[in-house]
Amino acid sequence: MIVSDSQIEDLIEKGELTIKNYSEENLTPNGYDLTIEEVVVEERKPQSEGNAVIPEGTWFAVSTKEYVEFPSNIAGEIWIRTTWARQGVISSFGMIDAGFEGNLTLSAFNSYQEIEIPIGETFAQLVFHLLSEESEKKYSDRSGNYQGQEGVTLD
């Protein structure tokens, strides 16, 4: 079941879901728009202010301003905002496991024209899924490779 805006607010209020650097204006009817904290273009030094220039045909990674903490009964799914898809940004994200906590690193590819991505702009929507029951093992118990990550994490 996808979690609605009012359910997201209730979960945060009860302390069952944490989104550090939460902004009510980023709440959507069925998710939360994630904000860019820093951008890495082709493995260069992370950029955390101004506009990141992404040349045509270039891979880049974004980390979120938001630091999320998922309980053991909620997973997440990330979708690129159509604003960026319409400019030729291609991405595939995947699921966020129950029990994960950290900033999120999102990779993408700029397909056809140079674009500028303002630091602090929203980039992707996080959709929360309520599991049918609590997971037996949390993300940290299974692998936890990126547990607690901050900033763009590529390794």
Image (cartoon, grey):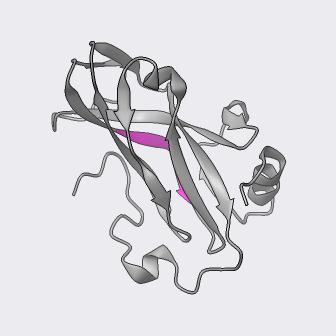
Give the position of the N terminus as an image quadrant: bottom right
In this rendering, position of residue 32 left or right of residue 107: right
Q: Residue at x 21, y 18 (%)?
A: 55
Quarter of the image for the C terminus: give it. Answer: bottom left
State whether residue 112 is above or below residue 26: above
Q: Decide: is 31 above or below 2.
A: above
Magenta stretch prevailing secondary structure: strand
Q: Which residues fall within the magenta stretch?
A: 62-69
Q: Position of residue 99 (x, y in %)?
A: 54, 71
Residue at position x 73%, y 63% in the image: 15
Residue 98 in percent (x, y) is at 56, 70
Q: Is residue 27 above or below residue 152?
A: above
Give whichever of 109, 61 is nearer the camera: 109
List x then y, in percent, for residue 53. Answer: 27, 17
Residue 25: within the magenta?
A: no
* Residue at the limit of the structure toward the bottom, as seen here: 136
